[in-house]
Image: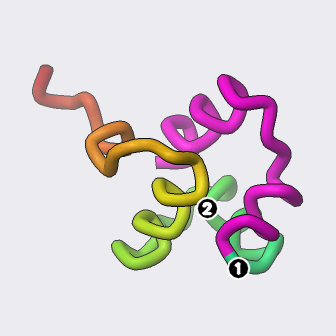
Amino acid sequence: MWKLIKNQMDKQDISAYRLAKMTGLSHNTLQNYKNGHEPSFSNVVKIADALGVSLDEFREKKNG
């Protein structure tokens, strides 16, 4: 999941610190995602909203 989030962050030139501020999530929470923890659905929604992307952008592309 982190790779998909990071890809969107890179496209928009947004740092993890900025994303934390935009979502209301702690920087430590984002660090946990970077380290392999899966975000809750509600946090994925917050991240997608902050980045202005559809939830579909964060779907794993395993089946396609």
Mark 2 → mark 1, Cα distance in angstroms: 15 Å
Q: Is residue 16 magenta?
A: yes
User: Is disc 2 placed on a helix, strand or loop?
Assistant: helix
The percent coordinates of residue 47 (x first, y second) are: 54, 60
The percent coordinates of residue 46 (x first, y second) are: 51, 69
Q: Amino acid at mark 1?
A: Gly
Q: Is residue 2 magenta?
A: yes
Q: Amino acid at mark 2?
A: Tyr
Q: Residue furthest left?
A: 63
User: Is disc 1 placed on a helix, strand or loop?
Assistant: loop
Q: Residue at x 73, y 65 (%)?
A: 22
Q: Observer-nearest residue: 37 or 22?
A: 22
**Disc 1 packing (10 Å; few <14; some 14–19; many ≥20):** few
The residue labelled by disc 2 is 33
User: Vertically, is 42 above or below 62?
Assistant: below
On the rendered structure, is 21 left or right of 63?
right
* Magenta stretch: dominant secondary structure: helix
Residue stretch in magenta: 1-23
Tag of residue 24:
1
